[in-house]
Image (spheres, rainbow, N blue to C red):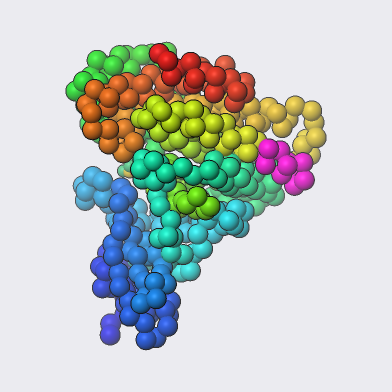
Amino acid sequence: MSTVVKETYQPLTEETAISLAKERNLFSENSTLSCTEIGDGNLNLVFHIKDQDGKGIIIKQALPYAKVVGESWPLTLKRATIEAEALKLFKKHAPDFVPEVYYTNEVLAITIMEDLSHLTIARKGLIDGTEYPLLASHLGTYLANTTFFTSEFGLDKGQKKELVGKFINPELCKITEDLIFSDPYFDAETNDFEPQLTSTVEKLWNDTELKLQVALLRKSFLTEAEALLHGDLHTGSLFVSKEETKVIDPEFAYFGPVGFDIGQVIANLLFQAIAFEEKSDAIYSQVRTFWNVYQNQFSVLWEHDNLEPFARIDGFLSTTLQKYFQDAVGFAGCELIRRTIGLAHVADLDGLSDEKERIAAKEKSLALGREFILKRNEFTSIEELVTFLHTKKYE
Ligand code: SR1
Ligand code: MG
């Protein structure tokens, strides 16, 4: 049998994925293996391999282009290494919420990891109406741990600088810079919106007050290396059940502003409230829980593990958390807007089959995104944000 691990990259097939699993001795010798390609994201192949007893693994392989667009959009394979390294580091700091990595191969751009197929992608589960009572608190804990221990508060400053270098991720960051922080605000080719939204979108393109604030958020994304971020923390990057939460897909990981990951979580929860108004109270309460758990856990770590000489100076912790929170509101606004009119949409909104309802939801997403960006620095607590969200419900 020829080996799969060769000197050059080639995309796996379901057959070669099985051969690779055998070569790596990931199953016992006499197992009967089956494999299905289950990738439904924008960028990668994902193979689920299992034996006759249902024991499984996942092989994720980066493609040298963006699947969502096609081969005309080349994309670095180095992202597979970034993803694997980020998974390992996040696993160290938030072990309950990250899958285990069994094997990585830079040439093939693959990561072999724990099988999570007993779980559901959170976006799908939420759209189907499932409630995940622990999701918000799990995400708060996951993010508090990962952002604290990769920031200069929880990590030796020399080590942090080394890690910043290791996680330089220019190609993937550029996707975010373009698709989140630039294209939706200009008449760019990548934009994708329904004709009924044209007049709102044109207003947005001419909204110089808004564009200034987006420019400032974009600058923060480009320059503020506060902690190692997941970089694409939407509900499609989460495997969940009622008891478990696993954060996957950190190929966009880089050192950036902490509020970016927090804001993506908030925005992607809010798509549910926007799409299904009857769920909005429950979703707002999830947003509240998420932030409260984040700030409590971050404060505990600050108290016990802070390496900063100024850690005990009055006001330093509260100022730090306030900055993360207000940044998060602004970044959430950018996510709401880009998922509505940019290249990559969300099924929460696109899946609304009634046209009137769908367009109304998208208008709401754009309006809320705009207000979040413009008003972010007026919110001094999660309660103020939740109260604001409740007033929006009845407009
Ligand atoms: C070309 S990639 C489009 C989007 O998919 C990824 O999951 C990121 O969210 C990116 O912005
Ligand atoms: Mg992804």
In the rendered view, would you say 216 is above or below 48?
A: above
Question: Which quadrant does the N terminus fall into?
Answer: bottom left
Q: Is residue 116 visible?
A: yes
Residue at x 39% of width, y 64% of height = 58
Task: Using residue 17 as the reference point, say whether residue 210 is left or right of it.
Answer: right
In depth, the one of 164 and 390 nearer the eye is 390
Give the image location of residue 214, x and y in percent: 43, 23
User: Is residue 305 located in the magenta-colored stretch of the structure?
Assistant: yes
Q: Is residue 156 magenta?
A: no
Identify the image quadrant of the C terminus.
Answer: top left
How many numbered callouts? 0
Q: Quadrant of residue 383?
A: top right
User: Going 53% across and 43% down the picture, which residue do you hit?
Assistant: 133
Q: Nearer the viewer, residue 1 or 99?
A: 99
Q: Nearer the viewer, residue 105 or 249?
A: 249
Quadrant of res 226:
top right
In the rendered image, residue 166, in percent from the top left (x then y), is placed at 52, 53
Q: Which residue lies at the image location 39% right of the left edge and 46% below the top edge?
A: 125
Q: Which residue extends farthest left?
A: 195
Q: Which residues are magenta?
A: 296-307
Residue 7 visible at all:
no
Residue 349's x, y, as percent?
31, 32
126 vs 162: above or below: above
Q: Main secondary structure of the magenta part?
A: helix
Check the image and report above or below for 74 versus 115.
above
**In the image: residue 200, left or right of residue 157:** left
Asked where in the image residue 381 lies, by quadrant, the reply is top right
Q: Residue at x 28, y 65 (%)?
A: 36
